[in-house]
Amino acid sequence: MGLVYSIVNQKGGVGKTTTAVNLAAYMALQGAKTLLIDLDPQANATSGLGVDKSSVQWSSYDVLIEAKQLLDSIMPTPIPNLSLLPATMDLAAADIELMPRISRETCLRVALQSARTEFEVILIDSPPSLGLLTLNALVASDAIIIPIQTEYYALEGISQLLKTVDLVTRHLNPDLFVAKVILTMFDHRTRLGNQVVADVKNFFQDKVSETLVPRNVRLSEAPSHGLPIVKYDARSRGALAYQSIAKEILQDGKTRTR
């Protein structure tokens, strides 16, 4: 059975989609059959893998709202071992359309049942909010990955996210846990960056990855070319960081499933 991870942070601009795309690419290249689910109406993970959003036939919207079979809706990517369930702007209405449904929080979990036997790792890029899309991601997941930007107010909103996670574990998904906290956009030259690292490690303890994702121009440029960093500049500092974190998460997952 594949492990399902939601990449979550309701605060925008923390590197959530960059983390989703690049972890997925490196996990696939390290031999794990991987599925990336784009659950963000902005569809940046979709375009970040070079997919033209206007050309998408079936998307995560169709799976959630129209009950389209998930395995019939995924598409291959240029990365070996990596498949994508793309998103389109249609997803922006999903929260409203899900609202009146019975068991609206479990739609994605039900849809994912068939994919769990086909993939070793499933990553969900959730939207920067705590609405029904993110709730579906949390209920469908085994664990969460939290990217946190090493900037002022880094921990702002994290307490609300953790309250939501706690509610989900108490009422909908008792086995959900925090797998990894990833510190992004780190600049070792600033006192603030180093202080944020210390604060986050104090808060999350051993959940924090020892590998810090640096502020890196190549990481910022890669999405505009529709490429994960491994295909854009595999020697960049950002690429090496995500390669290391992907290996770390895969190893943790193997240990947990033994």
Image: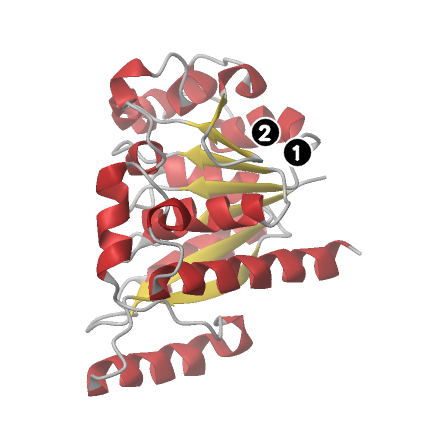
* Residue placed under numbered mark 2 in the picture: 112
| Amino acid type of the residue tagged 1 in the rendering | Arg
Task: Give coordinates of residue 12: x percent, y percent.
Answer: 23, 52
Is residue 162 visible in the rendered image? The answer is: no
Task: Give coordinates of residue 118: x percent, y percent.
Answer: 67, 30
Residue 4 is left or right of residue 182, and the answer is right
**Depicted 57 relative to depicted 142: above or below:** above
Is residue 99 visible in the rendered image? The answer is: yes
Q: Are marks 2 and 1 in contact (CB under 8 Å)?
A: yes
Q: Residue furthest right?
A: 258
The residue positioned 31% from the left and 25% from the top of the image is 91
The alpha-carbon separation of the residues under discs 2 and 1 comes to 6 Å
| Amino acid type of the residue tagged 2 in the rendering | Leu
- Badge 2 marks a residue whose secondary structure is helix
Write down the quadrant of residue 219 in the picture: bottom left
The residue positioned 51% from the left and 50% from the top of the image is 26
Q: Quadrant of the C terminus?
A: bottom right
Number of marks: 2
Residue 125 is left or right of residue 223, and the answer is right
Between 44 and 95, the one nearer to me in the picture: 44
**Depicted 239 relative to depicted 121: above or below:** below
- Badge 1 marks a residue whose secondary structure is helix
Between 167 and 248, the one nearer to me in the picture: 248
Task: Give coordinates of residue 163: x percent, y percent.
Answer: 42, 59
Q: Quadrant of the N terminus?
A: top right
The residue positioned 57% from the left and 20% from the top of the image is 71
Please tell me the numbered disc located at residue 116: 1
The residue positioned 50% from the left and 54% from the top of the image is 144
